[in-house]
Amino acid sequence: MDELLAIVLVAGCLATVVGLLAWLAARVRRRGIGDNVMGPFEEIWHPAAHRFRAEIRAHDERVVPLPSAGDPERRGDRARRPR
């Protein structure tokens, strides 16, 4: 009986840890803070992920925000807008 209780306890702890990590991963993806929280875990399982995250970070820094609908037009804006 004690062996069965030990097995159930270990399985329950493992399921709890896996469930918490899945919940954390979903929350991190929703909020967009995955780089800081899940980065070390991702590097353990996928070492090339560090280069991929660095490329995403560089791309985010290069993106130019589009003007809002109510902003007045500036000279040269029409030439830069995609058609």
Image (cartoon, grey):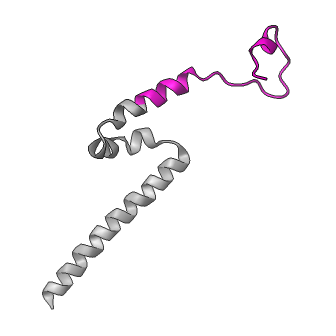
Relative to 24, does residue 6 appear above or below in the rendering? Answer: below
Q: How many marks?
A: 0
- Residue at 45 percent of width and 43 percent of height: 34
In-image side of 64 versus 22 (left or right): right
Q: Which residues are magenta?
A: 54-83
Quadrant occupied by the N terminus: bottom left
Q: Would you identify the image quadrant in which residue 46 lies?
A: top left
Percent position of residue 24, x then y: 43, 55
Percent position of residue 78, x then y: 81, 14
- Residue at 29 percent of width and 38 percent of height: 47
Percent position of residue 5, x then y: 20, 84
Residue nearest the viewer, comparing 42 with 14: 42
- Residue at 76 percent of width and 24 percent of height: 67
**Residue 56 is one of the magenta-drawn residues:** yes
- Residue at 45 percent of width and 59 percent of height: 23
Relative to 70, does residue 77 appear above or below in the rendering? Answer: above
In-image side of 24 versus 30 (left or right): left
Relative to 43, does residue 56 appear above or below in the rendering? Answer: above
In-image side of 46 versus 36 (left or right): left
Residue extending furthest toward the front: 83
**Residue 67 is one of the magenta-drawn residues:** yes
Relative to 41, does residue 82 appear above or below in the rendering? Answer: above
Percent position of residue 41, x then y: 32, 46
